[in-house]
Image (tube, rainbow, N blue to C red):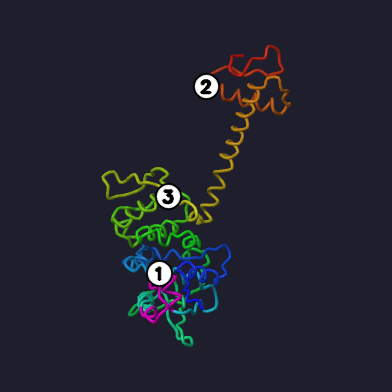
């Protein structure tokens, strides 16, 4: 008889497989990172979401992400043995009763934050997912909010996390600063974005300034984040009211979140740029063909494209025009006409 125990990877893959999610991604509302609330004067503002309370509880975060991935409908609950959860989250690997104690502490922490609730389900506990905002402050108390699938409407914005987070081992490669900044970056839902590293901006995400800096450095070192340039943004706390900040892009497999407005913007910008690039490459190939193989007869369409492209470049450089190859006294592309 074999006493083989499932590995952490096998336990995770079992949980991901039972979710039967199409596309191998799962949603998280942006309010998990940054919640929109009313200020003292009723003005809209932001405050840290529940992620900020999990920065020193990495095991609880791993359990929560697995619950988010697995639960897909019904009461948004899942029932599994404590030993399976313990192995999948990397909390306790042995198949004994101590796994129940170790996992129970993490469930209790998540329950206090209003992110899950536990129900007795036979001999096991059923873990039911609650809304990502956690406990909601009311006039004289706090309340849980039942989970519902996000719609993407204003006030219900979400981003998707790929199963590659586990399948490519990022749950082990990244430390908590890297994981927190990765989630915050995905919640931006833009191709290019900024990540505030000043104290005020970092606090809005529920992160410390040094945590953001360490997280960015960690993602850059793993090439999950790419620095794309700088952008000038408003900062009234500076002398001139503006400051220059770095801009970033997420790399595969985490570059999958774009808002509808961002998609429309990219559609409007890129077709012309892509068409210009294709035409440029086509003209360069034809010109090289003409120079290297003058004896080869070109089609009328190729000749016309070659002449037009060559004339445009020469005009930009202040040079002469390229004569039609079939015309009298045809000049080679490198000589004046």
Residue closest to the eye, 152 or 120? 120
Left or right: residue 12 versus residue 198 is right
Are dots 1 and 3 in contact, CB under 8 Å?
no
Mark whose residue sits in front, 1 or 3: 1
Q: Is residue 214 above or below residue 299?
A: below
Residue 112 seen in this snapshot: no
Instruction: Please state the horizontal and vertical placement of residue 316, each as a whole percent of the image.
Output: 53, 24
Instruction: Please state the horizontal and vertical placement of residue 46, each as a whole percent of the image.
Output: 36, 63
Which secondary structure, mark 2? helix
Which secondary structure, mark 1? loop
Mark whose residue sits in front, 3 or 2: 3
Residue to which mark 2 is pinned: 317
Specify the label residue 223 is tagged with: 3
Of all residues, the one furthest to the front in this rendering is: 1
Quarter of image, res 74? bottom right
Q: CA distance from mark 1 to mark 3?
A: 25 Å
Say which label, 1 or 3, has the lower sequence index. 1
Q: Is residue 86 above or below residue 165?
A: below
Residue to which mark 1 is pinned: 90
Which secondary structure, mark 3? loop
Q: CA distance from mark 1 to mark 2?
A: 63 Å
Residue closest to the eye, 94 or 224? 94
Say which label, 3 or 2, has the lower sequence index. 3
The span picked out in magenta is: 82-101
């Amino acid at each position: 008889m074999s006493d083989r125990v499932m590995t952490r990877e096998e336990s995770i893959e079992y949980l991901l497989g039972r979710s039967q999610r199409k596309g191998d991604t799962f949603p998280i509302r942006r309010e998990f990172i940054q919640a929109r609330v009313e200020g003292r004067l009723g003005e809209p503002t932001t405050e840290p979401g529940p992620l900020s309370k999990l920065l020193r509880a990495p095991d609880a975060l791993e359990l929560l992400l697995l619950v988010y991935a697995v639960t897909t409908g019904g009461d948004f609950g899942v029932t599994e043995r404590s030993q399976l959860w313990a192995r999948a989250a990397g909390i306790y690997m042995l198949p004994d009763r101590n796994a129940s104690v170790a996992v129970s502490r993490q469930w209790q922490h998540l329950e206090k934050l209003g992110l899950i609730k536990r129900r007795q389900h036979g001999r096991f506990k059923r873990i039911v997912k609650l809304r990502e905002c956690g406990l909601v402050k009311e006039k004289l108390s706090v309340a849980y909010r039942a989970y519902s699938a996000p719609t993407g409407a204003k006030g219900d914005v979400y981003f998707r996390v790929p199963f590659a987070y586990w399948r490519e081992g990022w749950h082990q490669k990244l430390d908590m600063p890297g994981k927190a900044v990765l989630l915050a970056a995905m919640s931006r839902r833009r191709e290019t974005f900024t990540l505030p590293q000043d104290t005020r901006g970092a606090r809005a995400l529920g992160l410390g300034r040094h945590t953001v800096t360490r997280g960015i450095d960690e993602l850059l070192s793993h090439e999950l984040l790419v620095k794309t340039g700088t952008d000038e943004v408003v900062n009234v706390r500076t002398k001139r009211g503006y400051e220059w900040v770095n801009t970033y892009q997420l790399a595969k497999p985490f570059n999958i979140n774009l808002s509808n407005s961002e998609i429309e913007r990219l559609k409007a910008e890129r077709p012309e740029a892509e068409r210009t690039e294709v035409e440029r490459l086509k003209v360069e190939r034809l010109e090289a063909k003409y120079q290297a193989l003058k004896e080869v007869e070109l089609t009328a369409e190729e000749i016309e494209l070659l002449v037009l492209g060559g004339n445009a470049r020469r005009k930009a450089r202040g040079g002469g025009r390229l004569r039609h190859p079939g015309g009298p006294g045809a000049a080679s592309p490198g000589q004046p006409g």
